[in-house]
Each structure stands twice: as C-alpha cells, then as structure tokens.
Image (cartoon, helix red, strand yellow):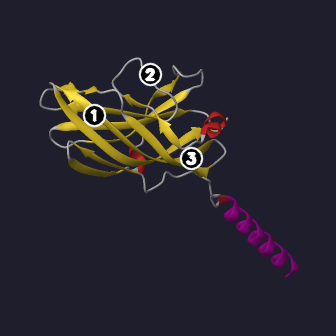
Amino acid sequence: MKLKFILSNTFFALFIFFFLSCKKSPQSIPSKSSNDYLNVVVAGVSYNESILNDLHVQIGGSQSSVCDSYKYIKEQFTSISPTNFDLVVGLKFYQSDSIFKKHLINGNYSLGDDQAYPEKTCNLTLLVSYFDNSSSSYAKLVSGGKNTITSIVKGNTNSTSQDYIIQGNFTCSWLLNGNSIPCSGTYQKTIEVSIP
C-alpha cells in the first residue's frame, strides 16, 4: 500500500512538472501603436489613412547620412492611392536607441523628396513623393516644405528594441507640368530602434 502511495505521488509530481515545463512562457514583444495615422489634404481633397501594424515597411538596410556618421533606417509607413496619384510618406531616423534617445526634441525637422538620390536627409526627416498616374511620372518636390515634430513618446520595449511614438504635421508642394500641387497633413508613427 505504501509503495502504491509513493508511486502515485511520484507520478502526480512528474505529471505536474512536465505540464508546467511545457507551458509557454510569456514573451515581451513590443507592439506598434494601433492608433498610427496619416491625415492629409492634397490639392484641397482630404484623405485619412490608418497605418496598419503589418504594413510598416523598412526600406533598405541601415544608411549613412549627410548630417553625421550615425546609421539610419528609412521606413515607409503608408501610401495614399486614389485613382489619379500615389502619395508615399516615410520617416528616416537613427537606427540605434543609444543615439536616438539623445535627440528627443520636439521642433522643426527636414522634409525631403523620397525619390531624390542621394538623399540629403537627417534624423526624423519626413520623406514624401507624389506619383502622377496619368503621366506616369513623379512630381518635383518644391523646396521650403516643413515637418514639425510635436511629440516624441517612449513606447514598448524589450531586450533588443525600443518603440517611440512620433507625432507631427507637415506642409509641402510639388510641381507637375507647371502646376502646383499643395499638400498638408498630420501624422502619428510608431518607430522601432535597436538596443545594442
């Protein structure tokens, strides 16, 4: 009887041990903000776009800049595509959190042409391009556009990355066949930088 008790308790203890060891441990995975958006007015017409978490696209690998020797990431975060044009908007930012967190300052940043090469862009440059579908050509970005960052807030973090939620507004215009195409907008974009 005593042997049965010991065997059944041993079996029960082993069962509990294996059950608990097979249970998945929770992982801390940073999630993008579900509230990211782009609201623009292009040539007097309003467009509002929610930025879906799975559509964040990193363009290319890390890049250097004309501003400094740090590595950057260029990330397209949405495009607006009615029948007559495609508007693409992205953000260029420091790749490393140790560098990025030293530059958490609201204010005026560059606005650049996403089609220009080489890009003359720096940290938190908003990159825009306007493609005209009827002529199958890109419009020329007029200098003097503005990109103002109004908020930079720390988001989720894990052992390899840190999220930041960036809010801002911008104005710009393009020239296409002698016609001006004005654009203004507001945005919220969650970015992810590496923790070395």
Binning the other alpha carbons within 10 Å of mark 2 as few (below 14), some (14 to 19) or many (20 upward) gives some
Q: Are marks 2 and 3 in contact (CB under 8 Å)?
A: no
Q: Is residue 188 above or below residue 79?
A: below
| Depth order, front residue of 166/182 | 182
Q: Classify mark 3: helix, strand or loop.
A: strand
15 drawn magenta: yes
Question: Residue at label 1?
Answer: 173
Marks 2 and 3 sit apart, C-alpha to C-alpha, by 25 Å
Which amino acid is tagged 3? Asp
Question: Residue at label 3?
Answer: 163
Residue 35 at x, y = what percent? 43, 56
Q: Are marks 2 and 1 in contact (CB under 8 Å)?
A: no
Q: Is residue 58 above or below residue 188?
A: above
16 drawn magenta: yes
Q: Nearer the viewer, mark 2 or mark 3?
A: 2
Left or right position of 109 against 10: left
Q: Nearer the viewer, mark 2 or mark 1?
A: 1
Q: Which mark is residue 83?
A: none
Q: Classify mark 1: helix, strand or loop.
A: strand
* Quadrant location, the N terminus: bottom right
| Depth order, front residue of 108/12 | 108
Residue 114 at x, y = what percent? 36, 28
Farthest-out residue, bottom? 1
Counting residues from the start of the chain, the first of labels 2 and 1 encountered is: 2
Which amino acid is tagged 2? Lys
Magenta-tinted stretch = 1-21
Q: Is residue 110 above or below residue 68?
A: below
Q: Residue at x 28, y 40 (%)?
A: 183
